[in-house]
Amino acid sequence: MERRVIVSGLGTVNPMAHNVGDFWKGIKNMENGITRISHFDPVDHSSQVAGEVKDFSAKDYMDGREARRMDSFAVFAVVAAGEALKDAGIKDGDVDPEKLGVILGNGIGGLETMENGFKKLFEKGPRAMHPLLGATMITNIAAGNVAIKYNAQGPNYTVVTACASATDAIGQSYRLIKYGMCDTVITGGTEASITPLGMGAFCNLQAVSSRFNDAPEKASRPFDKDRDGFIMSEGSGILILEELEQARKRGAKIYAEICGYGESCDANHLTAPHPEGRGAVSAMRKAIEHAGLKPEDIDYINAHGTSTPVNDPVETKAVKIVFGEHAKKLKISSTKSMHGHLLGATGGVEAIVVSLALHEQYYPGTRNLDNPDPECDLNYLANKGVEGPMSVAISNSFGFGGQNAVILFKRCQ
């Protein structure tokens, strides 16, 4: 029997805040999370701005020994998962641990740990590398640490689909609950790739913004004609998904219901979207059809909206194909304009935004949309969020390799 799946808890560590409450206030106030890079001296990099997690110490959330055994991407996930579980009101023993899963999305893994390992290898030889290097840098270890910390004995794995990773992880978690394999899943994504290697890779690919090094607050500008690349960010966005009746019995707060999930591949190019948005169209249509809805039922789209010259007009084109005349009535925004692009974690952070948007009946705006690109001619809520009735929303995530994932959320009365 198919079961209903709801969102009962939220947690985040990201460039705008270390918790959901402050993050949501920042979203509503159109605040900026993008600054000059401080994790290392970026003077030799063409892009010198990023969405760093600021004023954060792992020792404020765990003991020093535990923190030293984790890369930052795992720390972010463990901290955000703790907040989400507390928000959901789930304590040890409240749910069956064998039916509690952890499905996370991640793009790169422990890049900082990997770089430090390479440095020791080349400077001092292999014996100088930390004995836990392998267990600290591998992509799945954030999910492993979350499971150990919170006694989640159910399915545990990590989805790696580039920038679609967290959205795919949420979609897979939804399926696990819907079809009875789990009752509860800790899901979302995490990433910590603002390192010399991580930034250098995307700089040399000419994918990140380099025009606004002296004005970081203006660098992320989705759908604006002056955009010149995405802004690398870091952090984690975690949701607690539950089977509806279990959540009701617990008296849990319900932010939203997940009713549809679509996934596809462009099968076209390593880094560029299909010029006609083929995969994006397919994923959006699948999510809507899976929910048993029609395009005109959708009120809001949290766009992928990366602020790259190629993505934004292609996403606009895909929305027009899927929604037809209704595209003009949709409210659309890219909150990456405020928090940047968290790569494999971005879908988790944006799923939090959509869940809160439905719960509070508020449409977030798009920061820095000062001069709209003529090719991006839909209602992207330029520089201002608005209150208003919202029943159904979708969250888009598209990634390198042609990966596309879309989650459909409904307001749960």
Image: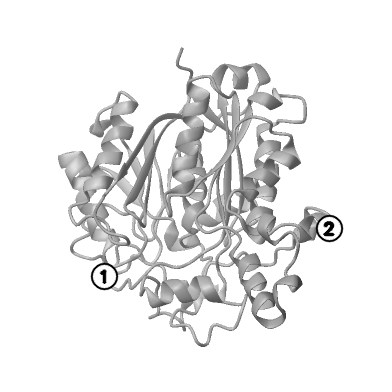
Q: CA distance from mark 2 to mark 1?
A: 48 Å
Q: Nearer the viewer, residue 113 or 42?
A: 113
The picture places residue 258, in percent across and down from the top left corner, at 45, 30
Q: Nearer the viewer, residue 188 or 294?
A: 188
Q: Nearer the viewer, residue 306 or 372?
A: 306
The picture places residue 82, in percent across and down from the top left corner, at 70, 43
The picture places residue 128, in percent across and down from the top left corner, at 75, 73
- Left or right: residue 348 versus residue 87 is left
Q: Is residue 112 above or below residue 155?
A: below
In the picture of the structure, the residue carrying the numbered disc 2 is 65
Q: Residue at x 50, y 58 (%)?
A: 342
Task: In the rendered structure, find residue 43 and report the number of the disc placed on it.
Answer: none
Q: Single out the mark in the foreground, 2 or 1.
A: 2
Q: Label 2: how many residues lie within 10 Å, few (<14), some (14-19) or many (20+)? A: few
Q: Label 1: how many residues lie within 10 Å, few (<14), some (14-19) or many (20+)? A: some
Numbered disc 1: secondary structure:
loop
The picture places residue 285, in percent across and down from the top left corner, at 26, 36
**In terms of sequence position, does the residue under pointer 2 or pointer 1 come before the other?**
2
Q: Amino acid at mark 1?
A: Lys
In the picture of the structure, the residue carrying the numbered disc 1 is 225
Q: Residue at x 47, y 76 (%)?
A: 200
Q: Residue at x 38, y 58 (%)?
A: 366
- Report the residue that reaches farthest toward the bottom: 43
- Report the residue that reaches farthest toward the top: 1
Q: Nearer the viewer, residue 166 or 308?
A: 166
Q: Amino acid at mark 2?
A: Arg
Examine the image and state in which quarter residue 111 appears.
Answer: bottom right
Numbered disc 2: secondary structure:
helix
- Left or right: residue 55 versus residue 52 is right
